[in-house]
Image (cartoon, rainbow, N blue to C red):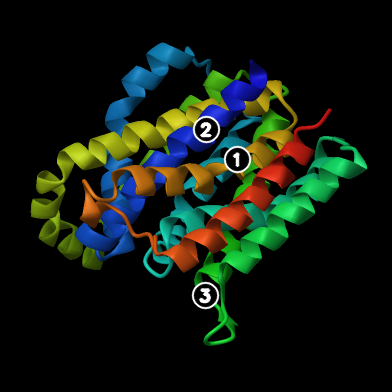
Amino acid sequence: MNIFIAFLNPIIHGFSNTLDSHLSNNIFSRVRVFVFFGGLLNLFSLPIIFSITKPNFLSIDVLPFILLIALIETTYLFPYYKAVKVADTSIVNALFSLGKVFVPILAFFIVKERLATVQYLGFIVIIISSVLLTFEPKNFKFNKSLLLMGIVSIILAIEGIIYKYILESISWGTGFFWVTLFSSLISVSIFAHKPSQVIIKENFKSFKKSFKILIAQEILTWSGNMVEVYAISILPITMVKGITSSQPIFVLIYAVLFAKLFPHAFKEKTDMGNMIKKIILFLIMIGGTLLVIQK
C-alpha cells in the first residue's frame, strides 16, 4: 500500500506537467507571469490544505528549513518552465531523474540512509537512460533542457533531503502546509517588481481565459506534492525519488491517449522513431525503478 501511495505522485504529476507545458508554451510566454498566477491560486487553496493536513505551528528551529524549502519550491520553476519550452514534456519529466544521483549521497550524510548495491545500480540505470533521451544524433549534441533540468534536479534533490530531515520532528501535514504558504507568498511577491507588474497586468486577460486550466493544474500540482511529502514521511527518501522516475511514462501515455482530442495541449513527438526511442528508454527506467524499490 505504501508503494502505491508513492506511485500516486508520478501519476498525478504526469498530468500536471502536461498542463504545465501547455500553459508555458501556449498561454504565458514569460515564466515569472506563470509563477505569479500559480502562487496566487495556491493562496486560495490553503484553507482546503489546512482542513486536510491539520498543521501545527512551527518552532523556531524548523522555520529556517521550511523557508528554504519554500524558496526552492519557487526557484526551481524558472529553469523548469524554460525546459518545457525546448523539449518534449515526457523528456523533461525524465530529466528530473538527473538529481537521483545526489539523493543517496546526501541521504547518507544527512539522514543516515543506506541502500543495497542493487538499489544504487537502479539509480545509475535511471540516470543513463534519462541522459540518452536528450541526445540529438543529427547534431551530435544534447538538448539544452539537459542543463536546465540538471539544475532543477539537483535543487529538488536537496529539497527532498531537507524535507526528510524536518519530517523527523514535525508531521507531514505541518511541513506541507507551511511550505505551500511561504512558497505562494514568495511567488506573489514578484508583483512588487515594477517591470513584472506591467507584464502581469498585460497577461491578466490570458489568466481569466485560462482560469479553469490553471485551477486544474494547481490542484493536480499540490495534490501530487501532498502525496509526495506523505510518501517521504513513511518511506526512505531514495525510494520515493526512485519511484518518481516513472513519471515520464505516464506523460507519454497521456499523450498517446489524448493528443488527438487535444492537439494543442501536448508538446510531444509521437512519430515512430521517437516513440521507439522513448519506449525503450522508459522501459529501461522502469527496470531501474524496480531495482530502486527492492528491499
Label 1 crowd bin: few (<14), some (14–19), many (20+), radius 10 Å: many
Residue 84 occupies quadrant: bottom left
In the image, what residue occupies the spot 32% across and 59% down?
A: 32
The percent position of residue 246, horizontal first and vertical second, equals: 58, 42
Label 3 crowd bin: few (<14), some (14–19), many (20+), radius 10 Å: some
Q: Which residue is mark 2?
A: 9
Residue type at numbered disc 3? Asn
In the image, what residue occupies the spot 40% across and 65% down?
A: 82
In the image, what residue occupies the spot 26% across and 47% down?
A: 37
Q: Which residue is mark 3?
A: 143
Residue at the limit of the structure toward the bottom, as seen here: 139
The answer to whether residue 181 is visible is: no
Q: Give the side of residue 276 with respect to residue 123, left or right.
A: left
Q: Mark 2 and mark 3: span between their CA atoms?
A: 26 Å
The percent position of residue 226, horizontal first and vertical second, equals: 49, 27
Q: Which residue is mark 1?
A: 244
Helix, strand or loop status at disc 3: loop
Return the residue nearer the eye: 243 or 178.
Answer: 243
Q: Give the side of residue 91 with respect to residue 191, left or right.
A: right
Relative to 81, residue 261 above or below: above
In primary-sequence order, the first of circles 2 and 3 is: 2
In the image, what residue occupies the spot 47% across and 12% down?
A: 54
